[in-house]
Image (cartoon, rainbow, N blue to C red):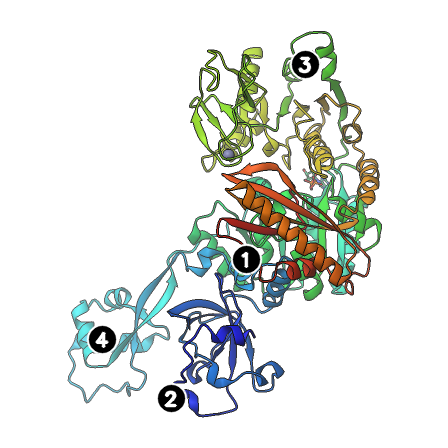
Amino acid sequence: MNSDKQSNLFDMTPEPWEIDDESDFLVAQIAFSEPPFGPWDYLIPDELEATLLPGMRVAVPLGGQKERIGYCVRILGPGDPNRAQIDRRRLKPISRQIDPEPLIQRDLLPLADWISDYYLTPLGSVLETIVPTSVREQAGTREMVFLSLDENSSRDWNHLKLTDQQRRVLETLAGYTEALTQKELCELTLCTTAVISGLRRRGLIVAHQRRVQQRTHELRPEQPMQDLELNTEQKSALAAIEHALVAREDKTFLLLGITGSGKTEVYIRAIQQAVARGQQAIVLVPEISLTPQTRQRFRSRFERVAVLHSHQTAAERAWHWQSIAKGQVDVVIGARSAVFAPVPRLGLIVIDEEHDGSFKQDQQPRYHARDVALWRSKHQRIPLILGSATPSLESYQRGLGHEYQLLHLSKRALDFPLPQVSTIDMRADFSQGKAIQPISKKLRQEIRQAIEAGGQVILLLNRRGYATRVQCPACGEAIYCPDCSIPLTHHKEGSKLVCHYCDFQMPAPRDCPKCGFQAIRFSGLGTQKLEQYLQALFPDIPSARMDTDTMRKPGSHEAALAKFRSGETKLLMGTQMIAKGLDFPNVTLVGVVNADSALHFPDFRAAERTFGLVTQVAGRSGRGPKGGRVLVQTFSPEHPAIIAASRHDYVGFASYELNLREQGWYPPFGHLVRLIVRSEAVHLALQASETIAERLKQAQATLGLECKILGPAPAPVEKLRGKFRFHILLLAPRHAADSNTPRLQELVKQATENLKFPDEVAWIVDVDPMDLL
Ligand code: ADP
Ligand code: ZN
């Protein structure tokens, strides 16, 4: 592969050993995680022929470099037609094999190929994502020296002159099948290290190095819990899944179940079936739902549960990963990247809250865990369960079209009705000429009532910081991040202005930096200000705030939730962090402080996100015998997303929104690809994006592809981290039988082949983007 290009990288004089022309040589294709990515062809030297396997890392010479680490992705034997075209004399040999066992599981190599192809990402960079850094770097392991008897020695020491101690050492070693460390041997024989060294010098004992785990972490089983008696809907959902498990069908189920309907219980029972058949399951949850509560729930039902998440130490993560690879784990729970967990006998994948944006990675490779899971499901012939109260419209549409099987859970498992939702029109206050209060009179009264009746309250405000706008009332100057086209947010703690995109910080000014006016205004409502406001309003109600600013310390999340659970805190306010997954039966009131905060973003998913967030947070109310209510403050009470959310009407919202999407080929009716061009110089970014758009149009004509090319246009966030951004959107209709039509990926590949821009210009491709800002 690429051998013409590759030859330029090497000095071409053949080495003496290269001259003999044996025909049974083996070629390994090696991919790198940095340019030049390859894969490139290398010769497998004789001594590695028996041990080298695809998925292992090797060290190879590259260009002027003596050693570069790469992944062996394929081995071409004599029978391979691709090998026939390779001239052995042009190949450099691999210098060294690094991993004794493949680092990439066999099933995952073709998956990596698919990701590389679909997301237009070099294979080496995909492989680097599949295996956590901690595993690659062998975190938590140590090289140790082990001692054993020389294998060739006769074990008959009678003819040798030995001291009693020396004899004892040799006999001890002979009694153990495993090698011992020096420390162990000294302890067992009550000898000093000098005795052992003497025996090593005489060649009777040999030493060898091996990597060992320094410490084992526990899988920590919880108090086991009994199965619950499933209700009718749960039973029929489970029956459908079981059928696919037994038949080894690669079926996808969309479990559309309202909040609290018992979806998790269905997952658990399905996983039990898989485990009983000697298989393992992967459960993906959004990062913020990976709470101790979630883990406990699985640990109380399964003995061997591994967790993969970003707050683990490298050593812990590597240990969990290795245990999974060894087949010592039944269930893996994790965030996005756990979809790559190397379970040996995968039986089932579950994605909870499948609509969640965190399943898409926002850096290369920009994969969506749901699509990776679909791939694994198809190729490993196992069922996949997607669960949500508010599924992504992509999944729902496939459910309607019978690509996925829709399963409904329409009632709450504990038979408590869904809470009643009312909207509060914030324009009313405004039109009466009153200054708008963050909390309307109605919501204030209901908070008071709920607390007095012994209930608890959750308030959602999806904006952190104190004031979200900093503006001079005299000249109108608003303060923006110098690096991003984003207004700065005032944070009272530390009295600073912060950019929520790049984390730029500056001291909060008192005077306007432009006109010098001496009372700059901090307006707009963030969670810090809300907290202060509520403390003044309800000094007697113990409250807590949860957002990324208050939850920085490890464990603070759990501590805050524990206090709320115990009733020590009565009022919990925060960002979307509190909207999902929490199950507190004593919560009788949920208030959405500003439902519109994301409704008018220039993103076609704005309504979907708003609907989802309001529905999710509403679902935190009324989970116990006291019932519950939800109040939604909004300036757009007539917006279909708000109306549908207040009626718990997913199906109604979906049909409204699907109708809009269909008109513009937007997902799920179309495929979307986004290209972003960035540069510190605005004209360079513009020029480059125009060049790409021009080439895309040419490629479209050549390929005869039905698609729209929108742009280039400045991205909604025009400037980010000091770079100007232009984007181009590609939209193509999604046909049921997609395979024969050239894909947008082909278009991008053709248009960007050999594309050269000045170093100051960078561009990226995002296939199926979730974020259009
Ligand atoms: P979801 O995942 O759909 O939000 P959960 O699985 O968390 O719902 O279930 C909500 C609550 O109902 C939990 O407390 C759970 O233990 C309980 N539950 C679920 N299924 C049953 C059942 N069949 N019988 C009794 N309680 C159930
Ligand atoms: Zn910024």
Contact? badges 3 and 1 (CB < 8 Å): no
Say which mark, if any, is on residue 440. Answer: 3
Between 55 and 299, the one lying in front of the other is 55
Label located before the other in sequence (1 or 2): 2
Disc 1 target residue: 756
Q: From the Cβ of disc 4, is ligand 1 less than 8 Å away? A: no
Of labels 1 and 2, the one closer to you? 1
Q: Which residue is label 4 attached to?
A: 168
Q: Quadrant of residue 191?
A: bottom left
Q: Nearer the viewer, mark 3 or mark 1?
A: 1
The residue at which mark 2 appears reads as: 16
Of tags 4 and 3, which is closer to the observer?
Answer: 3
Q: Earlier in the sequence, mark 4 or mark 3?
A: 4
Q: CA distance from mark 4 to mark 3?
A: 85 Å
Q: Secondary structure at mark 2?
A: helix
In the rendered image, the vertical position of residue 680 relative to residue 551, given as above or below = below
Please tell me whether mark 2 or mark 4 is closer to you in this view: 2
Classify mark 3 as within 8 Å of ligand 1 or not, answering yes or no. no
Q: Is residue 186 visible?
A: yes
> Closer to us: mark 4 or mark 1?
1
**Left or right of 175: which side holds 168?**
left
Q: Is residue 349 visible?
A: no
* Circle 4 residues within 10 Å: few <14, some 14–19, many ≥20: some
- Residue 332 in the image: state x and y as whole percent: 58, 54
Q: Reading the chain from its start, which is encountered first: label 2 or label 4?
A: 2
Q: Is residue 542 above or below residue 96?
A: above
Residue at 57 percent across and 12 percent down: it is: 538
Mark 3 vs mark 1: which is more N-terminal?
A: 3
